């Protein structure tokens, strides 16, 4: 297993993984989400150019099987890394890949002297919630949405 940073050459790989992730997440929350496939290359370019964002891939042999997308927030009150998205292909789950991706983030946090990691998880995504709790994440507050029509 190899963990590596994404490059601009990875736009097709990222687009396929994001599309698979969105399809699965739509089923979990019971709401149709438009596929990000056509936006992935632009999104990846923005991620790579932004020093406060990152995308890391988990690769086995020649296949990318997962990723974690993150942002770093620094202001007068806080300094933390936020996990924007994490995804492992269904056939590779429960193999420790998600943990390896989180371990890589912790390594990045230590290099940047960041002491807090945050994320959001759907209340309907029980498997993800259990995974994060197992890694030591704690529920700190509730995040709420308001859709304006």
Image (spheres, helix red, strand yellow):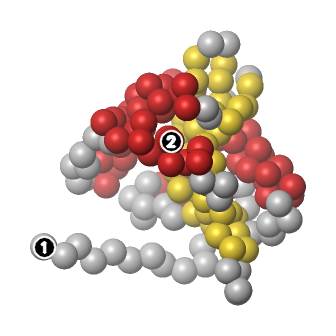
* Residue 129 coordinates in the image, percent (x, y): 54, 57
Taking depth in this image into account, of 97 and 49 the one nearest to the observer is 49
Q: Is residue 34 left or right of residue 109?
A: left
What residue is drawn where x is 50% and y is 48%? 46
Kindly identify which residue carries mark 1. 149
The quadrant of the picture occupied by the C terminus is bottom left
Going from N to C along the chain, the mark reached first, 1 or 2, is 2
Label 1 – label 2 distance at C-alpha: 31 Å
* Residue 142 coordinates in the image, percent (x, y): 48, 78
Kindly identify which residue carries mark 2. 45
What residue is drawn where x is 76% and y is 44%? 104
* Residue 9 coordinates in the image, percent (x, y): 55, 25
Taking depth in this image into account, of 5 and 132 the one nearest to the observer is 5
Q: How many neighbours does mark 1 have within 10 angstroms: few (below 14), some (14-19), or many (20 or more)?
A: few
What residue is drawn where x is 74% and y is 25%? 2
Q: Nearer the viewer, mark 1 or mark 2?
A: 2
Query: What secondary structure is marked by label 2?
Result: helix
């Amino acid at each position: 297993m190899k963990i590596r940073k994404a490059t601009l050459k990875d736009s097709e790989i990222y687009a396929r993984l994001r599309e698979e992730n969105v399809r699965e997440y739509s089923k979990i929350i019971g709401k149709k989400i438009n596929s990000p496939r056509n936006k992935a290359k632009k999104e990846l370019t923005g991620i790579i150019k932004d020093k406060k964002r990152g995308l890391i891939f988990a690769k086995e042999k020649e296949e990318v099987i997962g990723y974690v997308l993150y942002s770093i927030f620094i202001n007068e009150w806080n300094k933390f890394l936020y996990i924007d998205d994490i995804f492992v292909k269904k056939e590779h789950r429960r193999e420790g890949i998600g943990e390896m991706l989180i371990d890589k983030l912790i390594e990045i946090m230590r290099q940047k002297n960041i002491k807090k990691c945050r994320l959001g998880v759907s209340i309907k995504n029980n498997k993800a919630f259990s995974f994060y709790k197992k890694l030591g994440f704690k529920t700190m507050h509730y995040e709420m949405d308001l859709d304006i029509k």
